Image: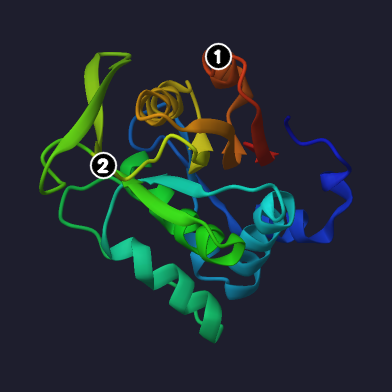
Amino acid sequence: MACGEDKEQDPRIQGIAASIRVVPDFPKKGIMFQDITTLLLDPKAFKNTVDLFVERYSGKNISVVAGIEARGFIFGPPIALAIGAKFVPLRKPRKLPGIEARGFIFGPPIALAIGAKFVPLRKPRKLPGEVISEKYVLEYGTDCLEMHVGAIQPCDRALVVDDLVATGGTLRAAMNLLERAGAEVVECACVIELPELKGRERLNGKPLYVLMESR
């Protein structure tokens, strides 16, 4: 499911789209980078983004929201939303604002609002204790996601949340990881889709819900 269901007519969508900065030729030439950090500086747009997802998933018996990476982003976004403040992400030097961190921006507030647990999916060697891993192929190599053993129960119904879907490789790896642990993946949810990269075709037929396509 892409940008249907009359979402284009929702003024909240227009405000969200207007708050996202497009940076040409970043991180390399030819890429139009969809920078959601400017959305986080607009408390109204940030709240509307979370509200739209909450409206979709409330009452659907989702027990797990799985987001991808970055611990400091777990508590900051829900607190900022609750007090009507902007959220400013602080990143380490030379750390690109990639998919591994941004899934933590939207996942925790959605999980709190619908009464689900939040399960972090992280890059290798970031989680203490016993983990389960899922490798996946990138354009020029491989990567891996990890999750704590025991975080998922066989009866869990899971929602995978990220900011953007491009080729779909990371979302597919997240789905595989959750399903191997015994969860039923109900849907994947992203703010932005890059339709020209056909990422939804890699999701094994699982529904993909996005708020908008890239500009």
- The residue that label 2 is drawn on is 122
Amino acid beneath label 1: Asn
Residue 86 visible in this rendered orientation of the protein: no
In the rendered image, residue 162, in percent from the top left (x then y), is placed at 48, 43
Foreground pick, 20 / 12:
12
Whether residue 16 is visible here, answered yes or no, is: yes
Q: Position of residue 184 (x, y in %)?
A: 52, 30
Q: Residues within 10 Å of mark 2 (few under 14, many from 20)?
A: many
Q: Nearer the viewer, residue 139 or 61?
A: 61
> Which mark, by number, is residue 16?
none
**Circle nearer the N terminus (2, 1):** 2
SS label for mark 1? loop
Using residue 181 as the reference point, say whether residue 163 is left or right of it.
Answer: right
Gap in Å between the C-alphas at discs 2 and 1? 22 Å
Element type at mark 2: loop
Q: Are marks 2 and 1 in contact (CB under 8 Å)?
A: no
Quadrant for residue 96, please give it.
top left
Q: Nearer the viewer, residue 73 or 204?
A: 204
Q: Which mark is residue 204?
A: 1
Residue at 66 percent of width and 53 percent of height: 53
Image coordinates for residue 105, horizontal then vertical, percent: 44, 58
Q: Residue at x 41, y 46 (%)?
A: 67
